[in-house]
Image (spheres, rainbow, N blue to C red):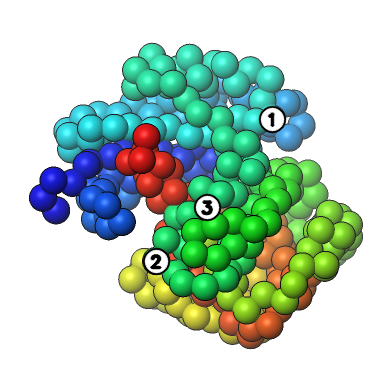
Amino acid sequence: MPDALRVAAMDCGTNSLRLLVTDVRGDQKRDVVREMRVVRLGQGVDETGRFHPDALERTLAVTREFGELTTVLGAERVRFCATSAARDASNAEELSDGVRSVLGIDLEVLSGEEEARASFLGATRSLAGPALVVDIGGGSTELVVGADGDVGWSHSFDVGSVRLTERFLRSDPASIDEVTALESYLDDVLTPRLSGLDPVSTLVGVAGTITTVAAHALELPSYDSSQIHGARISVDDVRTACLSLLRMSVADRRALPFMHPGRADVIGAGAMILDAVLGSVPLATDEVLVSEHDILDGIAWGAAAS
């Protein structure tokens, strides 16, 4: 892409650290590389309020790897954003200092609202008309309603796959009592905020929990982004896939051909969040549109615009 600006975006979530290097020119971008590593930065943060030293070590090791890759690829601008776990950790400056030492740039800790807007921008850049974007992460879940790039309503919930696994789902597979307690909690948290929304005609699901549930619903023989991105799956099939994943043991999930091993132990809680959202939001559609474009793309667009 001639005269394009090459930018690198890093999204440091509660469970994974991801990299996107992309060439941006005007309203177009061409992705050069996407990488993801499960670092579990949010290990124990919900309970202790602090980053575990091992989690910081894992995260900064991958940050160094990604930094070297951005240099090799000639990225002109680099942006590193952290989300839920960094908002909660009292020792977040240790991550910030580490990122500055490794990459030579300042870490950005996105607020829940900023995270939601970045997810919406990344998911809907090429989508016309109103939509609800659902982004389920390891520490938080963002829902955003908007149209044509403009956000009308958003909310960040402190419910995520890692956070709720650590808090509720201690057994393998989860016990009936654990599932019931989490269902009740999600109903208390989500329903008051979501039940009053106008009926949603387009629901876009993004990020690893939802794309993994989609792969399960589609019965893919391996994780295939080309089949997942843009897939339209019935709400009933999505909810059936959620229940199936919840009932499995971690070993059975890990044996699924599309399952990332670092997601197998927390996908049950993530699936329960997705199922609860689909049960709480007024729907004027019977399908979920799945997108591989999400907050990482939004961070990249922001880097190009800065």
Examine the image and state in which quarter residue 194 appears: bottom right
Residue with the mark numbered 1: 88
Q: Residue at x 59, y 56 (%)?
A: 151
The residue located at (52%, 73%) in the rendering is: 129
Residue type, mark 2 in image = Ser
Tell me the mark number nearer the camera, choosing from 3 and 2: 2
In the depicted structure, whether residue 201 falls above or below residue 52:
below
Q: CA distance from mark 2 to mark 1?
A: 33 Å
Q: Earlier in the sequence, mark 3 or mark 2?
A: 3
Q: Position of 243 compared to 189: left or right?
A: left
Task: Tell me the element at label 2.
Answer: loop
Q: Position of residue 247 (x, y in %)?
A: 70, 69
Q: Compute the Cα span from label 1 to label 3.
A: 20 Å
Label 2 packing within 10 angstroms: few (<14), some (14-19), many (20+): few
Q: Is residue 289 left or right of residue 235?
A: left
Residue at image coords 32%, 41%: 304
Is residue 49 depicted above or below 259 in this figure?
above
Could you tell me the amino acid type at mark 1? Asp
Residue in front for this viewpoint, 179 or 201: 201
Please tell me the numbered disc located at residue 126: 2
Q: CA distance from mark 3 to mark 2?
A: 13 Å
Q: Mark 2, mark 1: which one is toward the viewer?
A: 2
Q: Residue furthest left?
A: 2
The mark closer to the camera, 1 or 3, is 3
Foreground of the two, 271 or 176? 271
Say whether marks 3 and 2 touch (CB < 8 Å).
Answer: no
Q: Quadrant of residue 133?
A: bottom right
Q: Indicate which disc residue 119 carries.
A: 3
